[in-house]
Image: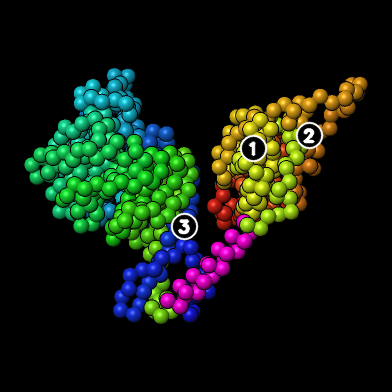
Amino acid sequence: MRYILILSLLYTNLAVGQQKDSIVYIHGKKLELLNTISGRISPKSVVSNDYGLFFAQNMMYKHTITVYNRKFELVKTIPDNIKLGKYGFLNHTGNYRGAPVECTFSHEGKYAWVSNYEMTGGSSSEFSKPGCDACNSATKYDSSYVYKINTRTFEIEKVIIVGAVPKYMATTPDNKKILVSNWSSGDLSVIDTELNKEIKRIKLDAYPRGIVVDAKSEFAYVAIMGRRKVAKLNLGNYTIEWLDDIGRNPRHLCLSPDGKMLYISLNGEGKIAKLDLETRKIVKKKTGRLPRSMDISKDGKFLYVVNYGSNELTKLETATMKIIATSKTKSKPIGVTVDHRTKNVWTACYSGRIMVFHDTYYDSIPINITERDEMLAALAKKELERKKERENRQIKPSKHSNKPIKNELIDGQFILVSGSFETSEGARRRLRELKRKGIKAKLYYNKKNNRNYAYIGSYKTRAEAVQSAKNQAVDSWAFRLPKEAQLGAVKEKKYEDVFVEKEPKKIINEAIEASSNLPFLIVSGSFSSKSNAKARVRVLKREFKDAFVYYNSKNEKYYAILGDFETKETARLFLKTTKEEGWIFKR
């Protein structure tokens, strides 16, 4: 019974593993956020070399490749500027810059191969016809280049010319070839790793993207994002077999360890497809809006998918195609890689962050079968008791449940409605739910449609309301109040104009602050509107009870404050220990 107390706390996040003799294993389900890396980055992708290094490609927005280790430390920043003449391209004598997109590794992680979206620099006649995401022509656009980087010295050792707008790259398991999908020229470059040059260019179709190679280095699969198909390329004779009608906009590919199943992210459908390569049977699962990149666990049990449009990392079980876990990410997650040794999942967010999650499934706990059965019985009993308690709470009406809602004047023209109900009892029940989540809410009765609203904030403009809705932890929508419900819109008794001396703006903080007036503040958001700052503070208060709003009279901005501190060092230490982002301000 030694695990019952511990596991009862984790009950909702555990699953029972496979039986082996008299021992079973308890596995976690969660993807736990370990760290969020920031800095001068805008990562299009992040890739592990499986030996403790992680390369993030920061496109033309930062013109760098940033390298990290397993301690989440920045090891090296590699600029993308080079002199092409130094690498044998004698017709290019100036200084040039790339735009790192994707990366693959060869020779046990010793070499990183990085594709560059385009090249810039040199004279006005050089690189004057760059490709683009909407460009499609084999001859119209400039060729670009791949960098070969030594992962010990972080020096660019070789530069190889390929097609227009090279994007995804894959290494054949025998380390003999690097395959590069050229987006704008619609073809595939084959690089010989010994010769360090392109040895073959294979015509495909509009917008080739993801690539995966089988374990024997015999076949490569290439996603054609501009169509509904995948190319199966024979790496011996370079012939192509087409896998048609896969789905809209196939982008990324993963292959099961046994080579029998091909997994495809369908960006246009919001789904992941599982294709049986023998029977051609296909199964699809919706994961989120705009699923982009994927990676597969070494044992082939799970897929990790980033959903660019819904800001999520999704974990799928490959056997059942069921969603096991979903974690929110920063804006625009676009790249993902698994560190198979630590079971950490690195996620690149285009908005300027790398988030590292840990898959708790692999933190398994061995347990005797008898203990397991006793534990599960105890947990099931406890969960049944909790369920009854919840049902009783919902059924039991409060003394005010049936009373009609009496409207008060609201300071603003718009409110954020988080529930619309036929009865006042329903609205009050929603009010209690919101309060349990730490969200301040109020009630409003709409006379026009006889609906009862639970709302979570009032705003002067629709734009403020819509912006605040994006920061809320619950779904909500903006409703325009009738004039008779707006404070200040109702005509009041007129008085003679009296001149009142304007108080200094710093006095505003006496009504806003709920702190101890310590000098150093950690700012988690700066807003022109007080209501937006308050909305941010409401979100922060779920984790930081001392969060408050501070008005900076110098720039006339309202700050959402995580907390205040005696010294700058104390504030800095606090920032290092929290997952929230912020900056230190001295008042």
Q: Secondary structure at mark 2?
A: helix
Q: Is residue 553 above or below residue 105?
A: above
**Residue drawn 13% across the image and 39% down it:** 240
- Where residue 370 sits, quadrant-wise, is bottom left
Report x, y in % for residue 308. Answer: 41, 40
Q: Is residue 511 magenta?
A: no
Q: Nearer the viewer, residue 471 or 142?
A: 471
Instruction: Please indicate, yes or no, whether residue 196 appears anywhere in the rendered image.
Output: no
Q: Residue at x 25, y 35 (%)?
A: 228
Q: Earlier in the sequence, mark 3 or mark 2?
A: 3
Q: Can the viewer see residue 477?
A: yes
Please state which of residues 28 and 48 is positioned toward the viewer in this rendering. Answer: 28
Label 3 neighbourhood size at 10 Å, few (<14), some (14-19), many (20+)?
some
Label 2: which residue?
505
Mark closer to the chain start, 1 or 3: 3
Above-or-below relation of 214 to 444: below
**Counting residues from the N terminus, which is met first, the one under dot 2 or under dot 1?**
1
Task: Identify residue for label 3.
Answer: 32
Residue 554 figure quarter: top right
Task: Identify the residue at image location x=79%, y=26%.
Answer: 490
Disc 3 to disc 2, how far (Cα)?
Answer: 43 Å
Instruction: Locate the C terminus and report the quarter of the image it occupies.
Output: top right
Q: Residue furthest top?
A: 125
Answer few, some or many: residues within 10 Å of disc 1's Cα (few below 14, many 20 plus, some between 14 and 19).
some
Residue stretch rendered in magenta on the structure: 373-394
* Proximity of marks 1 and 3: CB atoms separated by less than 8 Å: no
> Which residue corresponds to mark 1?
451
Magenta region, main secondary structure:
helix
